[in-house]
Image (cartoon, helix red, strand yellow):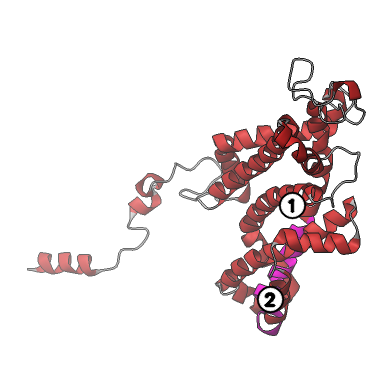
Amino acid sequence: MADEERRDAVAAAPMSLDSAPALHDPAAIGLPPATAGETAGALDVSAGRIRREHLRQLVRSTAFIVGAVLFLWWVVCAIFGNVLSPYNPVNGNLVQFNLPPSAAHWFGTDSLGRDVYSRVLVRARDILIIAPLATPLGTALGTAIGLVQGYFRGAVDNVVGRLVDAVLALPVVIVAFLFVVALGPSTLTLIIVIGFVFALLIARTVRTAVLQERELDYIAAARLRNESGAQIMFVEILPNVFGPVLVEFTVRLGYAIFTVATLSFLGFGVRPPTPDWGADIASSSQYLAAGYWWETLFPALAIASLVIAVNLIADSIEAVLIR
């Protein structure tokens, strides 16, 4: 009878950590054995290790590799286009105008006798200057606006939100077009206008992410430490919403390329005779009815391939970050 009472007492007593050897065994909870200098069972979740794992996942992604190769190809063309192009992209030969693709002219010639292949290579330069500069500008400004909206909420959120809604009541391209018409087309104007318009779109995404973060315990702890609003937004919250910001950056880069090409097509991009994909599509589209399809097709394929490359990279990054 005494033995049964002792067994019942032992069974009812709470087990201490020292009396549970399985909890000290990393293998018992599925962790790898501890190495020298590490605490047994400690899980290394350092930022460096997470970044390396994300990088390994991206490298294994076929979509990311294809997108990166395509994008790097156009970057090389933007930098070394004049070296790679077999003909002068600006000067034409009126004796060899509207020639179809051939061994001498891979993409044919246009109505002024200029080699279409050479112009396609060189055209990447301006679009890959404007879009990559406008996108970081819009991302930085949009992130700041979204942080302020999401953290302070109330009247600040309402006022800024109404301004954003008012500007974005029209399609993005139309808004950018109106600003460019008012300010006059130039490289600097395109960078500022596209960056400003995209900042309003990015602000919405960042605001939503900040609204979720501001209710968590670490924000309450930061307030108890008497940290300022700027410290909480840019030191505490920003690193935790960096994933959505990075995804927005890559997605908006593709939209920026398309927007630059659209404005050039409408006549408000890079000034002739500088080669430009959108402007060349606009000038050559009138010859489609005559059967000169190559003058329009190859610049359009160049724009499509660059936008697709950026979107493949963006989708791969998003898939890794939300996994």
The residue positioned 51% from the left and 40% from the top of the image is 35
Query: Who comes first in sequence, dot 1 or dot 2?
Result: 2
Residue 218 or residue 322, whichever sits in front: 322
Figure check: 82 above or below 280: above
Residue 172 on the magenta segment = no
Read off the residue under disc 1: 259
Q: Can residue 227 be seen in this view?
A: no
Q: State the extent of the magenta-drawn residues as a range.
A: 137-157
**Mark 2, residues whose alpha carbon is within 10 Å: few (<14), some, or many (≥20)?**
some
Residue type at mark 2: give it.
Gly
Coordinates of residue 126 in the picture (x, y in percent): 84, 42
Disc 1, SS: helix
Coordinates of residue 228 in the picture (x, y in percent): 74, 76
Extreme residue toward the bottom, this view: 155
Disc 2, SS: helix
Secondary structure that dominates the magenta span: helix
Residue 81 or residue 301, whichever sits in front: 301
Read off the residue under disc 2: 161
In the displayed structure image, the side of residue 59 where residue 164 appears, left or right: right
Residue 251 disc label: none
Coordinates of residue 321 in the picture (x, y in percent): 56, 51
Q: Which quadrant of the view contains residue 64?
A: top right
